[in-house]
Image (cartoon, rainbow, N blue to C red):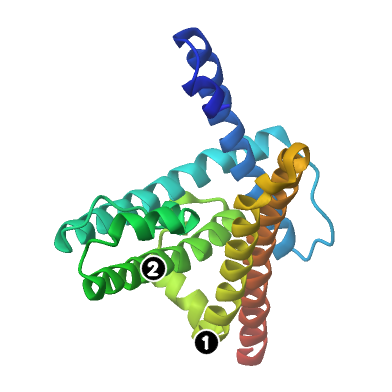
Amino acid sequence: MNGYADTHTIKYKLIFYPMALFVTLFMYGYGLAITKDTIRNGKKLPLIKIKQCTVFGIKASIMIFIYTLLEGFLLYDLSNRFYLPEFHLRFALSHLIETLKLYYWHNPISTIEFIIASIMITYILAFFMEISLARLADGGRLLGAFNILKIKRCIDTIGWKHYTADYTKIMLSIVILAYLQFGIDLFGFFSEILDLIIGLLIFIIEFIGIGAIYREYKIKKEKRVIEID
């Protein structure tokens, strides 16, 4: 929808940009509904509820916007420190050949350091954002989902090594599928169908994955309460 609006007149922009925003909010909302259902040991995708998806979508969008804003600020500052063009990791990784051509003239050592530092920033922020999204899905409170101390306690209960391993598996799955998604233009007519299927797989893997991880936290937390009693 955004792509269509970009190439058409202002009348179409006024129609399709708001539509794209609403669809994005709704998808985020349904993603959190999937996470909530997974936390509660659901075995299949939940029913779509308009009110729940809309409320969840608004809250999730605010949360993701704040994390993305912080990521953008850190990466922009990093770019300036390394005297490199403004940089966005996800775009650079999805257009790897163009990225390498763009930076070939720069000091290769500092470029490698820059890329590693960028990956670390993105990884760490997403590391905590996923737990924040799961907390939002579980309790529905936006401010509570940002509570750093409670996020730390969640990861302490799950186990930092265990959470890191599970989180990394989710991220690697998404990256592999995303690269497949960028390579499907070779399939011609079927590319849009395959693009949609892979996009849905990425969507489901992320939200089911963080729900499954957070469910482990809930189970371990309940066990500790029973042991104390």
Badge 1 density bin: few <14, some 14–19, many ≥20, Cα 10 Å: few
Badge 2 density bin: few <14, some 14–19, many ≥20, Cα 10 Å: some
Give the percent coordinates (x, y) of residue 173. 64, 67
User: What residue is at 47 percent from the left and 77 percent from the top?
Assistant: 153
Please identify the residue farthest to the bottom as the structure is shown.
227
47 lies left or right of 65: right
Look at label 1 and name its amino acid: Lys
Task: State the SS at label 2.
Answer: helix
Give the percent coordinates (x, y) of residue 147. 40, 63
Which quadrant: the C terminus?
bottom right
In depth, the one of 171 and 221 nearer the eye is 171
Q: Would residue 202 be visible to someone looking at this image?
A: yes
Q: Would residue 144 be visible to someone looking at this image?
A: no
Check if mark 1's residue and mark 2's residue have beta carbons within 8 Å.
no
User: What residue is at 23 percent from the left and 61 percent from the top?
Assistant: 105
Task: State the SS at label 1.
Answer: helix
Q: Is residue 57 above or below residue 12?
A: below
Which quadrant: the N terminus?
top right
Give the percent coordinates (x, y) of residue 74. 26, 58
Look at label 2 and name its amino acid: Ile
Please identify the residue farthest to the right as the structure is shown.
43
User: What residue is at 34 percent from the left and 67 percent from the top?
Assistant: 121
**Residues at marks 1 and 2, CA–CA distance in whole angstroms:** 19 Å
User: What residue is at 67 percent from the left and 34 percent from the top?
Assistant: 51
Q: Read off the residue under disc 1.
A: 161
Q: Read off the residue under disc 2.
A: 119
In depth, the one of 1 and 219 nearer the eye is 1
